[in-house]
Amino acid sequence: MQNIDSLSKQFSIPGHIDFIEGTDGLIVARINNELASAEIALQGAHLYSWKPREEVPVIWLSQDARFERNKAIRGGIPVCWPWFGFHEVDLRKPAHGFVRTCLWTVSGTEALEDGRTSIRFTLTSNENTIAIWPHKFRLTYTITVGTKLDLQLITENTGNLPFKISEALHTYFAIGDVSELEIHGLAGYTYADKSDDMTLKMEPGPVLIRNEVDHIYLDTEGMCRIEDQRQQRGINISTQGSHTTVVWNPWIEKSEKMGDMGENGYRTMVCVESANALNNKVTVNPGHHHELMARYEVTGLQCEL
Ligand code: BG6
C-alpha cells in the first residue's frame, strides 16, 4: 500500500505536488503551482479544494465535512461509479456506487510546460469490488490543476462480458448565495425530478434554486454555466462523454437530515454534475473503454440576473 514516504519519493515534484497526512490519517495529494492550488484525498481520489490564484475557492467543502475512512466527504468532487444514486435492485449497496470511498493508487504525476500539474489515479477490480459489482474493470482518473480544472475518468472493461454503468463527477461548486444564482445551458431539456417521484418535466429557462432541487437532465450536450451574481463571477462547465447533467441543492429540511451540510451550508453550494444516468447509461464492451471528461473555468458574469 502507498504511504507518504513512498509517494513522496516516487511522485512529489517540487513547486508542484507533495503528499501529506490529512485529517484522520487520510493521505492527501497537495498541489501548489504558479496557477492554482488543490487538495485531493487518495480515498475516493476525492478533490476537495481547487483555487486558481487571485480567486476565492471554486469548490465547496462543508464546514462539517468529515474526513473518515470509508465515508464520502461532504463537498468537493465525489466520483460516483458504477452506479449513480441508489443501486437499482439492492438498496443495501452504497448510494452512488463504491469508488468514492475506495483507496485509489497514485500512478503518475506530471508538471506540464504551461505550469499546470496533473495527477493520475487508478483503481482496479479486486475481490472486494467483485463482491459488490461482479465485473472486471480498470479506472484511470486524471486531474489537471491550473487556471482551469480538468477531470478525465476512463473506464476500461478488462473482463470477458459487456457491462453497463452510470456515473457522475458530483461536483459541489462554491457560490456566494443561492438566491443570486442562475444556471444556464439547460433550458429546453427534459429532466427527471427526483424530489417529485421522478416525474419528467421540461426546463423552461435558467435553473433557479428556491427550494430543494434534484433534477436529472437527460441527453444534455455542450456547455452549461453558473452565473453567481453575489460573487460577480461565472463558472463554465464543459464536458465530453457526458449526456446527463444533474443539478442538486438539498435546501433546508434535507440538509438538516443529512447532518454534515454545516449551518446554512445549502446557501453557498450547488452541485452541477457531469454524468451518464437513467437512459444515458453507458455499455462498455470487453477490451473497450469509455471516457468522461469535465472542464471548469472561472469567468466574469455574462448575464444580468
Ligand atoms: C445527488 C442526488 O446527485 O446526490 C441526490 O441527485 C442525493 O438525490 C445527493 O441526495 C447526495 O448524495 P449523497 O449520497 O452524497 O448524500
Image: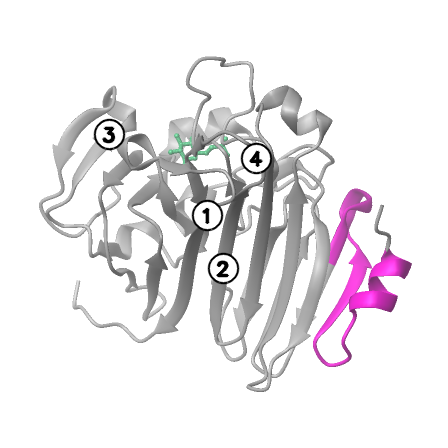
What amino acid is at disc 3? Answer: Asp
Circle 1 crowding by C-alpha within 10 Å: few under 14, some 14–19, many from 20: many
* Residue pictured at 22% horizontal, 47% vertical: 208
Secondary structure state at the residue bearing disc 1: strand
| Residue 248 found in image quarter | top left
What amino acid is at disc 1? Answer: Leu
Q: Position of residue 96 (x, y in %)?
A: 49, 31
* Distance Cα–Cα, label 3 vs label 1: 19 Å
Give the residue pinned by disc 4.
Answer: 260
Give the residue pinned by disc 3.
Answer: 193
What amino acid is at disc 2? Answer: Leu
Magenta-colored stretch includes residue 126: no
Sequence order check: which comes first, mark 2 or mark 1? 2
Give the residue pinned by disc 1.
Answer: 169
Circle 4 crowding by C-alpha within 10 Å: few under 14, some 14–19, many from 20: some
Side of 86 where 140 appears, left or right: right
For the residues bearing labels 2 and 1, Cβ distance under 8 angstroms? yes
